Image: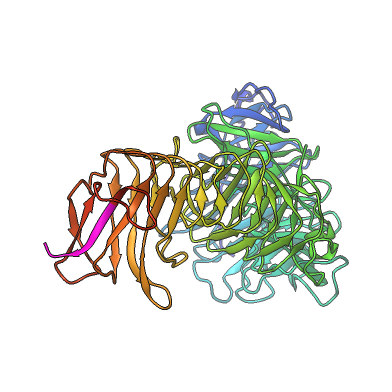
Amino acid sequence: MRQLDRLFCGLLCAAAMAALGGAPARASTAAPAVTGGFSVFPVASATAPVQLLVGTDGRLWFVTAQSELGLISSAGQITLLAVTLPHGNVTAVLVGAGPEGVWAYGNMTGTTPSCTVSLTNTGGVITQRTLTHPAASLCYGGARDATGNGWFSIHGAQTGSGVSRMVWLSQAGKVTTILTDRAGARPGAVTLGSDGAIWALKFDNHSYGRYTATAPATTVSIGGSETPPYPGSIFFGVNPHQLLPRADGTFWLLGFNVILSDPGKWSVRYLFEGHEFGATTPDGALWSVFSDRTGPPAERMVRMDVTGRFDRSAPLPAGTTSAPMATTGPIAATPNGSIWTVTSDGTNMYVLRYQPTALTHVSIWTGAGGGSHWSTAANWQGDTLPASGDAVEMPIASAPIDDLPGLTLQQLLMTGPAHISGAALAIGTGGIQVKSRVQASIANPISTGASGLQIIADPLATLNLSGVISGAGGLLVGFSHSAGLVVLTAANTYSGTTNVAGNLEIDGNQPQSNVIVSAAPFLIGGAVGGSGTIGSLRLDNGSLVSSFAGITSACPTSLAVHGDLVLSANASFFPEIAGCGTPQHQVATRVRVTGSVTIDPSSFLFLGTSQDATQSACLISSQGPPTGSFASAREGATQPDYGADSGDVVRFTYLASGGPGCYANALTVMTGIDP
């Protein structure tokens, strides 16, 4: 085998090697801990960790984007050493650390690919080798074995037979290559198993490769024919790219969802709503970071044990700018059970330590136990029934029946087309969230509580709430104008305000709740409509629509407002006059207001017409006096009548009586007029 053997041995001055035998180059001061189990340690962006690694002695190493090496103490002191790891044009990757030093590799991509592996030892000496066989090879993973040697997966420029190797590099710099036992296997995600062997995921068929210094490589299947010792779930779609060993010989395979695998024997697939990176604590649990899909931006630490029990922390704290933190990628678990990661608030960078506390259990519905009842433990991932304070997730098509009365859930997540019925529910600050494109419904009575209830539907999702919503609190529908649709059909009795920042259709009778659309700090985009009855209606930056065409394909509606109607400067009104229904008949949008109507002159109206006949129709009528008019529909203004003969127009007036079915004060329109 050909290789370029480069070795430079030079003491890197005592001040460069605190952890490796000398004094630190730069160190930060730890910040005080914050609540919720989190401690926050600011770090300069230029020196922020891009990777974290726990050594055999429990110390937490990191590398920066410039391949500078550093340490983080258990108290959060961040020390940047005066050591830059050998690398090409890609940041160095740490793969192991022990008494012999820190193992790493760096790739040079481009026209002449190459991988350089290195060991920075306790005396401040860097031993490095640039691997040149197979030709144009790059490293795709690495690990430290139990005796302190480095193992690296390398692939040549081609992906065909004979260009993948596992390289074993001794502490003295001796390079030994071991062929994969299957052409094109391409090992990656390299780790040290509890049996002392080196394990790697093979990209050809999602199997394992097992390597030792004394025997040929072998292939082991991820799963086998034996029945797992505990129930699994029905979730699939795992594309594993991270391999995390456990002390009992099993592995976590992480790739959005997760597999727990006993090589060659069995595998259990679980739903795991976390990032595609994770870490394992000494108790064998898998930790990652969960991002709330909708609502205010929020990330949480999440934990899964071998039974599939899924728990999550409180949201990550805000940064010094008061903006929410988001993780930037690396995560590690130290022997004391702490979870470490790196975050940003969009301006500043932080190292974040989480000491597990106050976890919320997430009950995930699988339906694996048969039947539709919540009280069947086998219907839940991990065979654990939901309890008050839990979050509940519905990820599959199902019609579950809640027969566990008295539950107060922290959150209800509809990530699949579920249609829930049964006992009354109370839902806490997490509210109800529906994933994009999901069509779901809840028939259970729901209590808002004094603090109200948030309901969010992602884009293209629809949530129909047919159970009575009660309580002193109100509703917050949507966040930043999520484009999904929430439909209320019951005679709701809640008395708080309904704030709309998404799309809300009200077809039930709830005159005791006033509605505000897109109030500050929300932007333009919220919309309300329907054929129900509401309290007063104020449109600050949003729209009043006749129907959510394309979502419900409904005919134009008649909305009753028990109170006042106010359309502010940025408000819009989209009425319709159309021939629809079976048999087809003429229907016009009607908004009937028991109080007064106030229209800012800068507000906008656009009338849609389709297959309409010549007629006079009231669009808005009120018992109280109207004030103002629409900029696009002032007294006597016209617009094309798109549903009548070519060239016809419609004409608006605020002076004519509303007519049958309308109050006397009205904005009316005459269709089918020759210009």
**506 or 480, nearer to the observer:** 506
Q: Is residue 176 visible?
A: no
Residue plotted at (26% across, 44% down): 630
**478 or 178, nearer to the observer:** 478
Residue plotted at (60% across, 38% down): 342
Q: Residue furthest left?
A: 675
> In the picture provided, is 233 more to the left or to the right than 631?
right
Quadrant housing residue 651? bottom left
Residue 138 within the segment the image draws in magenta: no
**Residue 79 to residue 89: above or below:** above
> In the picture provided, is 89 more to the left or to the right than 597?
right
Q: Is residue 576 visible?
A: yes
Q: Position of residue 336 (x, y in %)?
A: 81, 37
**Residue 36 to residue 291: above or below:** above
**316 or 485, nearer to the observer:** 485
Which residues lie in the magenta part?
Answer: 668-675
**Residue 204 to residue 79: above or below:** below
Q: Position of residue 471 (x, y in %)?
A: 67, 42
Residue plotted at (51% across, 65% down): 135
Quarter of the C terminus within the rendering:
bottom left
Dominant SS type (magenta): strand
Residue 670 within the segment the image draws in magenta: yes
Q: Position of residue 374 (x, y in %)?
A: 79, 61
Quadrant housing residue 213? bottom right
**Residue 71 to residue 360: above or below:** above
> In the picture provided, is 540 more to the left or to the right than 151?
left
Quarter of the N terminus within the rendering:
bottom right
**107 or 510, nearer to the observer:** 510
